[in-house]
Image (spheres, rainbow, N blue to C red):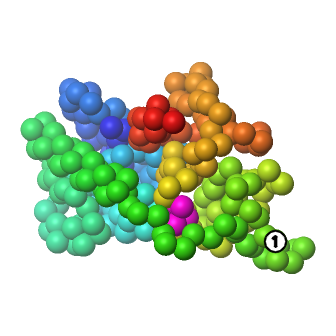
């Protein structure tokens, strides 16, 4: 599982990184010192777990956790702070753990394992979702040219950037009003999430291409765009492709 560490003290980030290196199955993919950089790192790295301090310059950890909870497919949040008085507020943000510094290795390991179990339960629940009884066969969007109708069969992927979602299709790309969460729920039988910000059409995947940094990109039929696969979703995608 990929881990993001958010703490304004570099020594605290380094100590936490060394602790995680001692726990099998977890890897630190980024360390940042404030909430703004944390949200940016989540968009790029798509970690499964965020270890989050409370008191930081700018938005504090509580505000950051609330923004994380609003994301499509958010990572699990574990607070790591020197202050115990924020625990009640922390769990109201849907955090899965609250550790008081100095954090002990055993405590950290238990919190990470809890986040792993919750992650598996959430993935299982999503995989067992039934497709909506009445699915759209086309996507509509208001553009400068008027109302644009795109056949779902022509759509290769949906990519989110901040508050906007773009449908990439054989005729080009179009901004739409749907959220990724809504699209994933409606088209669960034909679209698969490969990143926190990306859904792709399963039947139009031609293959996976490994990048020099070790990550994979999806090769899609009919479009040049190659969406990035986060390590968080890579194993599920390979399993799905193996059954096709």
Residue 131, image x, y percentages: 46, 64
Which region of the structure is painted magenta? 183-187
**Left or right, 28 with reference to 174:** left
| Identity of the residue furthest to the right in this view | 145
Residue 161, image x, y percentages: 62, 58
Choose between 239 and 173: the one closer to the eye. Answer: 239
Residue at screen point 18% across, 57% down: 98
Instruction: Examine the rendered structure and indicate whether residue 172 appears above or below residue 12.
Output: below
Query: In which quadrant of the rendered view does residue 232 lie?
Result: top left
Residue 20, image x, y percentages: 25, 33
Crowding at mark 1 (Cα within 10 Å: few <14, some 14-19, many 20+):
few
Task: Provide the residue designation for mark 1.
Answer: 148
What secondary structure is the stretch in magenta mostly built from?
helix
Q: Is 75 within the magenta?
A: no
Query: In which quadrant of the rendered view does residue 11 lie?
Result: top left
Residue 90, image x, y percentages: 23, 67
| Quarter of the image where the N terminus is located | top left
**Left or right, 181 with reference to 115:** right
Choose between 229 and 9: the one closer to the eye. Answer: 229
Choose between 228 and 141: the one closer to the eye. Answer: 141
Residue at screen point 68% across, 50% down: 156
């Amino acid at each position: 599982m990929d881990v993001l560490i958010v703490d304004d003290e570099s020594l605290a980030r380094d100590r936490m990184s060394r602790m995680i290196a001692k726990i099998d199955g977890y890897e630190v993919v980024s360390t940042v010192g404030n909430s703004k950089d944390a949200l940016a790192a989540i968009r790029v790295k798509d970690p499964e777990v965020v270890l989050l301090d409370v008191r930081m310059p700018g938005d504090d950890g509580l505000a950051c956790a609330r923004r994380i909870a609003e994301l499509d497919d958010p990572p699990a949040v574990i607070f790591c702070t020197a202050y115990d008085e924020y625990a009640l507020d922390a769990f109201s943000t849907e955090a899965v753990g609250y550790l008081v510094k100095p954090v002990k290795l055993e405590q950290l390991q238990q919190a990470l394992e809890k986040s792993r179990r919750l992650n598996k339960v959430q993935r299982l629940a999503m995989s067992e979702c039934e497709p909506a009884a009445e699915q759209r066969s086309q996507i509509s969007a208001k553009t400068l040219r008027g109302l644009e109708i795109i056949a779902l069969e022509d759509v290769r992927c949906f990519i989110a950037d901040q508050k906007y979602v773009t449908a990439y299709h054989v005729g080009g790309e179009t901004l739409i009003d749907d959220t990724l969460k809504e699209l994933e729920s409606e088209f669960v039988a034909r679209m698969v999430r490969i990143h926190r910000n990306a859904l792709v059409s399963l039947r139009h995947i031609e293959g996976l291409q490994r990048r020099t940094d070790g990550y994979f990109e999806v090769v899609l039929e009919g479009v040049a765009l190659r969406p990035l696969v986060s390590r968080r979703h890579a194993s599920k995608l390979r399993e799905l492709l193996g059954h096709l």
